[in-house]
Amino acid sequence: MSMFSGIGGAMSGATVEMTRLQVLSNNLANINNAGFKQERLLFEAELDNAGGGMGEGINKRSITGTHTDFTQGALQYTGRELDVAIKGDGFFKVATDDGFAYTRHGSFVLQPDGALVTPGGHQVVGETGPVTLPDGEVSISEEGEILGPNGPAGQIDLYTVADRQQLEKEAENLWRRPDDVAEELAQDGSLHQGQLESANVSAIKMTTELIEAGRSFESFQKAIKAYDKVAEKTNTVGRIG
Amino acid sequence: MTTALSTAATGMEAQQTIVDVIANNLANVNTTGFKKSRVDFQDLLYQDARNVGSAVTAENDVPTGTQIGHGVRTAAVYKINTIGDINRTGNELDIAIEGDGFFQVRMPDGETAYTRAGALKKDGEGRLVTSDGYPLEPEIVIPENATEVVVGKDGTVQAFLEGAANEATDLGTIELARFSNPAGLKSIGNNLHLETPSSGGAIVNIPGEAGLGTLAQEFLEDSNVSTMQEMVNMISAQRAYEINSKAVKTADEMLQMTNQLA
């Protein structure tokens, strides 16, 4: 049995906590970013050299991935005509230079030609093509029907995929769909004009997780130090004088 | 490790921007025709430590990738163009716009600027000017011997002259301008805005036509800033700043502990 599987376990634990802190920091940085969905770090205990009879190394941990928490964020009233929040399942579909992407960040702006775009300039796209708003006061129904001063003026559609974890997060509040994942119309999502969806980051939960990450890092650091001491002692065993 | 530090720093910066914008909104709570601003954010690039769907073995894919985010940045600060409360002042040259539109003002360099602050005055030549002395476009001159000025809902300006109390004299029409994307106007201070490529061109017409609002004489439009709402936003920004600073502190402590290993 070697000393080093133990120190390796402590090190893997410390590394996981460092990565966890990175994920937490990103969630916290986006706490006031509308439509943001928090990430969680997934890690698992790895059986290292199990069956050796000593139970050694079972404290080794490794990161298996990040998981996006898609729970609903609170809807906040803004009164702004071009703010649209999604309640329930679904994403707005927008056109980007690299194809279509998805977002829940519903604070849209207008281009001079009436194109409904994200603040990043990506136009919203529905079943009938790019969405353009008519001039004048516009109301958007829960089903996404756009009603302009002269009657119906198009439709905003919501899209989703069977397993949302397969979507890849990108900058600018966008998600991208891998080519082998099929897109479908979202069935149980509704639109709410004049509101925005808050980020689903809970400040309390994040604070406790921050403390937890810091404290477990500390105990791993102490374990590494202890292993170091033991190793030092081992080196001096049998020395005379 | 330093990633967590800089990520948390972007979060603190974001909250700082919110507070900056709120401070400006609150400072203008009593500014006639002022429109509040709002900050819009977007997240930064994600670093894919392991991609979704990449192969673990020939048969198995990674079910969830590892995506580490790098924080947040300001995407835009834009005006929220809801209408403010209309308040009666009793001053005959105070004119509020009920609905969409801006007064057109001629700047000293000949350019046209746009404003909703309708606290108009008379200058030495009798022209209707803004508080800063910029004349309305088209110009309206009020004769010296006018006893009363009447501004109609549709922008017509008439005056009753001394000695002719029963007969109104036409002085012209106040025209308004509107934009397909008023959030794209550039604010230049003094309640003035300039046209930009993203606002689109000005659509000029008389009040009440082409989607423009009507005029209300002896009224002024308050700012659309709600003190209560701004205070609530400020508290939330302050708390978010605090918690982001805690992430910085945790990262710092971890670094310190790492340094103590050797």
Image (spheres, coloured by chain):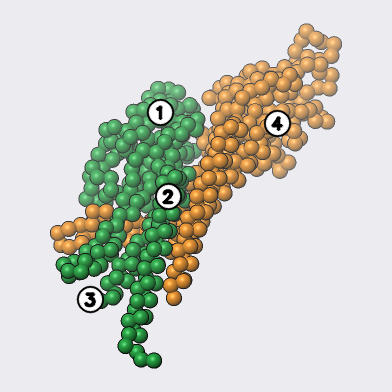
Could you say whether the residue bearing mark 1 is in a helix, strand or loop?
A: strand
Mark 1 Cα shell of 10 Å, populated few (<14), some (14-19), many (≥20): many
Q: Nearer the viewer, residue A141 or B22?
A: B22
Q: CA distance from mark 1 to mark 4?
A: 36 Å
Q: Nearer the viewer, residue B250 or A150?
A: B250
- The residue located at (29%, 75%) in the rendering is A4
Q: Nearer the viewer, residue B31 or B118?
A: B31
Q: CA distance from mark 1 to mark 2?
A: 40 Å
User: Which of the numbered marks, if any, corresponds to residue B136?
Assistant: 4
Observer able to see residue B137: no
> Which chain does the green colour mark?
A
Task: Choose top left, top right, bottom left or bottom right for residue A227.
Answer: bottom left
Mark 2 and mark 4 residues within 8 Å of each other at the beta carbon = no
Where A111 falls versus A168 (above or below)?
A: above
User: Which of the numbered marks, if any, corresponds to residue A208?
Assistant: 2
How many badges with numbers are in the image?
4
Q: CA distance from mark 4 to mark 3?
A: 90 Å
Where B142 falls versus A9 (above or below)?
A: above
Residue at which label 3 appears: A1
